Image (spheres, rainbow, N blue to C red):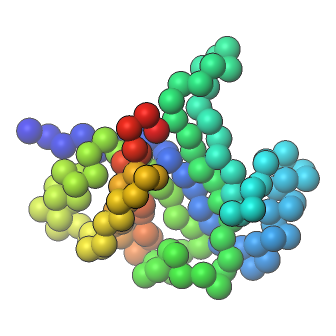
Amino acid sequence: MRVKRVTGIGGIFFKAKDAPALQAWYKLHLGIDVQSWGGASFDWTDADGKPTGGTTAWCINSAAGDSFAPSQAPFMVNYRVDDLHALIAALKAEGCNVLEKVDESEFGKFGWVLDPEGNKVELWQPPPGG
C-alpha cells in the first residue's frame, strides 16, 4: 500500500537579521496581522469566505535562532500530512535523512527530514479538526 504524501502547505518560516523590524514592515505594507509570536495564521476559506477547516502559518524568526538546525538555510517549509508516522517510516525505508525527533502536542504531530541539499523540511499532521 502506498503511503499518502504531502496534502498542502501548513506554514512558511524564514529568518531575518532584524525580525521585529521585518515583521513591522510586513504588517504595515502588506497588511499581515503579525502577532506577538512573530507570525500570522491564515485561515482557509472558500470563495464565499466560509471556513474550510485549515490554516497556514507564516512566521519570521530571528537569524540567531536554531529552530531550522541542522539546516543552514534561512527558511523552512511546513507541509501538511495525513499520517506522520507512516510517512516517516516510508521516508526512512527510502533512505531519506529523517531526524529522529517527533513532537506531539495539542498543535498536532511534527517530524522533520532533510532534503538532498540539507534544507530542513517540517512534516505536520494537524490535530483533528485542524
Tell me if 45 is positioned left or right of 115 in this view. right
Give the residue displayed 31% in from the left and 41% down from the top: 82
Q: Which of 28 and 120 lies nearest the eye of the viewer? A: 28
Q: Quadrant of residue 48?
A: top right
In the picture shown, does residue 62 fall above or below 86? below
Instruction: Kindly tell me whether residue 117 is visible in this rendering.
Output: no
In the picture shown, does residue 60 fall above or below 50? below
Q: In the current view of this chain or complex, which residue is farthest to the front?
A: 106
**Dividing the image into 4 quarters, which one contains the N terminus?**
top left
Give the residue displayed 38% in from the left and 38% down from the top: 128
Give the residue displayed 81% in from the left and 66% down from the top: 22
| Residue 51: x %, y % from top left | 59, 24
Q: Which of 30 and 82 lies nearest the eye of the viewer? A: 82
In the picture shown, does residue 98 fall above or below 40? below
Instruction: Kindly tell me whether residue 70 is visible in this rendering.
Output: yes
| Residue 33: x %, y % from top left | 79, 48
Tell me if 123 is positioned left or right of 4 in this view. right
Q: In the current view of this chain or complex, which residue is farthest to the top?
A: 48
Q: In the current view of this chain or complex, which residue is farthest to the right?
A: 28
Number of marks drawn? 0
| Residue 85: x %, y % from top left | 22, 54
| Residue 17: x %, y % from top left | 75, 79
Q: In the current view of this chain or complex, which residue is farthest to the bottom?
A: 64
Q: Which of 122 and 85 lies nearest the eye of the viewer? A: 85
Give the residue displayed 26% in from the left and 74% down from the top: 100
